[in-house]
Amino acid sequence: MRKKILAVLMAAVLVLIAVSCNESGVNIDDFTETNEESVLVIKEQTLSRCVGMADEKGVYTIADGIVEIGEGCFSGDTKIKKVVLSDSVKTISSGAFAGCKNLEEVVLTENVESIGSFAFYYCESLEKINLEVTKITDIFGNTFVCNYAMEEITLPETLEAIGHTAFAGCSLLSKVNFPKNIESIDSEAFASCISLDKVDISECTKLKSIGSYAFNQCQIKSIVLPEGLESIGGAAFADCKKLVSVTISSTVKSISSYAFLNTPWIEELTEDPLVIVGDGVLLKCNQKPVDGTVDLSGKGIKSIAGSAFENAGVDESAGYNSKYGYKYTNLLTSIEIPEGVTEINAGAFYYCSYLKDIKLPSTLETIGADAFHVNESGGTHISIADCPNLKMIGVNAFYGCGGMKAEDVKFTSELTYIGTDAFFQTNFLNSFWDSHKYDEAEPSYLVVDNVLLGVNIPKGATSIVVPEGVRMVAGSAVTGWNVANYYDTEEKALASGLNSYSMSRWYASNRVTSVSIASTVEIICDQAFFRLQQVEELTIPASVTTIYQNAFSYWEKLTTIHFNEGLTFIGQNAFNYCSVLRTFRLPSTLLVIESGAFGACNAIREFTFPIGVASIGSDVFVVNTISGSVVYCENLTVVNIPHFAKPVIYDIIGMNTSITVNYMEPVDKD
């Protein structure tokens, strides 16, 4: 009885405080009150923590004068069923209601300007939220993930962007009303919304991009893509097994691999020999080769979509490529890509292993990942010597093009990226490895037009010195040994019969203790120095502007990095699993840090982002493993970050409440 009386008195006190706050306008006094069942913390007009405060019906009304609902404010509160915002609330911060599994309704007002990432994460019972009345411009990553009870949502007219996995896994969501001002729908935004069958974006003429897996596994029956749309990401509509009608607008310039995989629509596109859509995108080829080739000339083709010619026989056991792939690959022995084509997307000619001759146009700018991954060590010939406009070469782009020789590989200063193993199993690269042995005295460097493509690291070498004049270090140029079939001693590695290439990788991981990067290097590509496990200190010269994905991953003894001013971009997972890294200072010139860049760097205790950074990816300190587990920077306790990142802080650091976050304001240069 005594506890009940105390609880009643507590509630009365809180009501008096709320009334007092209301009467004094927006000047909410700082206040903290806790007991065995509830917590209420108000600080500087922010409702910082509020758990167990709902009434007997599960309703809680935010007091007038509260401007912000703080990060994680209601998170984990199982008592609350309905929350009503006052007109004074402008901001709902990251993770504000995360894990409120019994929350059924949220009443918003027209004064709400921002809803942070993870704000309603796993609110499993949330049925009603009137987003349409708000003034928000972004729905950030993971905001409504797995809201299983939500059936329909109307997005506000002010909305411009929907972030990654924003509504992913909302299994009852059947209708989304999109505003005309939407400009981007990011990756997996509505993935696994397995009831979603009503999507109308036909009037969204400002929409430029639909991200990878954006509508994967939805129940959409038809879709009209709006004029103005330019790109469709990989698997964007894959596994929409009721999708029978797609209208692709004339402005679409790029369609990545598997965009419409496992849909009736793509399966039934068999009447036209060449299915050309949008602004000259060759989506699918149904044409039987004549004299071993398919004539693509004179068709106005500007881009070849991902998987357009993918071998129908690949992974037949999986039960889909036989329906959706190109069924005449065994007859296709040559192909000429016509002038005017600027892009060949990911997997365009994947496993076309009968191809012997491929001719590329001078207009070509982008070759996507696995574009010509033919997996044929024989005579597939392809040349990029006459592609002066080539800017990007993707991961495994020419994998297995055995006929590609040294004279076929030329680069210009236009080139900005070469992905991991782009030239693997080509005559060009194999000749380099075959000409060197593991018992040589010094490392040998394969440099073409100021691009370092490979390094042979012999038995006695302990240092790698990137030669002066090198502008770019290509993907996997100096990559170390992988974890599979790991040999813990040199004797075991040699006894296994490894070739010079494999032994070079083993020595890279187990013998190399220092790396010197030339002062001329500007770009370091994917896995360029992957798993050099014995190096303790690294200097990134001032010339380097760009470090791509996994470039320095798994440097397990690395303690110190000397960054110089000039670096602008750090890519995804660039330094992940550098588990003892603790000494570094990011340069003020840094503009972009992508997801997972410092994931599982367990020695980092405090991390400071440069005040001028403009873009920060998700899970910067987190590694999401293939098995589904999550690995954090387990000793990270303080993060200093520019204030603009506040709405997405949980997306950046994960839902890790043990981290103290300090928000930094830009310095006034005047």
Image (cartoon, rainbow, N blue to C red):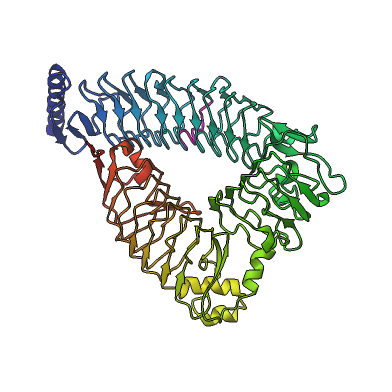
Visible in this render: residue 170?
yes
Relative to 204, residue 514 above or below:
below
Report which quarter residue 109 is drawn in.
top left
The picture places residue 310, in percent across and down from the top left corner, at: 71, 47
Residue 351, x across and y down, in percent: 71, 53
Give the total of numbered labels: 0
Q: Where is 397 relative to 518, above or below?
A: above
Q: Nearer the viewer, residue 145 or 226?
A: 226
Percent of width and height locating residue 202: 58, 21
Q: Is residue 590 left or right of residue 280?
A: left
Q: Quadrant of the C terminus?
A: top left
In the image, 647: left or right of 188? left
Q: Position of residue 387 (x, y in %)?
A: 65, 49
Q: Nearer the viewer, residue 637 or 357?
A: 357
Q: Which residues are magenta?
A: 165-174
Magenta highlight: main SS: loop
Residue 486 at least partly seen: no
